[in-house]
Image (spheres, rainbow, N blue to C red):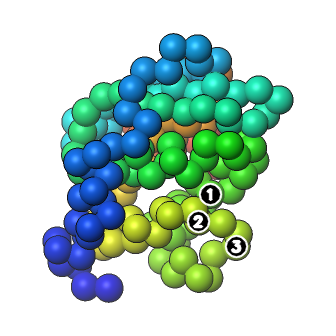
Amino acid sequence: MKADLKELYQEIILDHNKNPRNFKKLDRHTHKAEGYNPLCGDHYTLYLKVENDKILDVSFEGAGCAISKSSASLMTSCIKGKSRAEAEEIFRNFHLMLTGNLEPGDLPGSMCKMEALQGVKAFPTRIKCATLVWHTMKSALDGKQEAGTEQGAAHPAHNR
Ligand code: ZN
């Protein structure tokens, strides 16, 4: 894939940035965490309602670049109704796609629609934008209130 901005900001990203899904506060949440990416200024709060390891509802609030916001919008659409294990599997695959240079078709299991952000891997500094809300989801599910991006995070939460 060519490292070309037009490809990076493909239509699905522009759509989710402009009309983010699940962009609200979830009043009756069971888990909540804040994610902050100081490199870009992305800052979101993620809310989850989890029962018996199933993600019944999820939403987010905050502000950031098109990559982080569309990733949050796609993620919340993807993991709603899934088990915690399924959501973490999608995160693993998403992470592998961006950092392990694997094509979506080579990944084990589900990607949901996260391959829309494939172009981000050509822009290493933007990978943190794309993975921020995913790290935030893991932190929230682990009972932590805050998530940083990989460099700043004291806890390699995604590395179990
Ligand atoms: Zn960003």
The kind of residue on which mark 2 rests is Met
Which quarter of the image is occupied by the N terminus? bottom left
Residue 150 got which mark? none
Name the secondary structure under disc 2: loop
Q: Quadrant of residue 80?
A: top right
Residue under label 1, please give it: 90
Name the secondary structure under disc 3: loop
Residue drawn at the location 23% of the way across and 48% of the way down: 18
Residue drawn at the location 70% of the way across and 28% of the way down: 50
Residue under label 2, please give it: 111
The first of marks 1 and 2 along the sequence is 1
Residue furthest to the left: 5
Residue 108 got which mark? 3
Question: 14 and 143: which one is in front?
Answer: 14
Q: CA distance from mark 3 to mark 2?
A: 9 Å
Q: CA distance from mark 1 to mark 2?
A: 5 Å
Please report contact status of discs 1 and 2: CB closer than 8 Å, yes or no. yes
The kind of residue on which mark 3 rests is Pro
The first of marks 1 and 3 along the sequence is 1
The kind of residue on which mark 1 rests is Ile
Left or right of 97 in this view: 7 = left
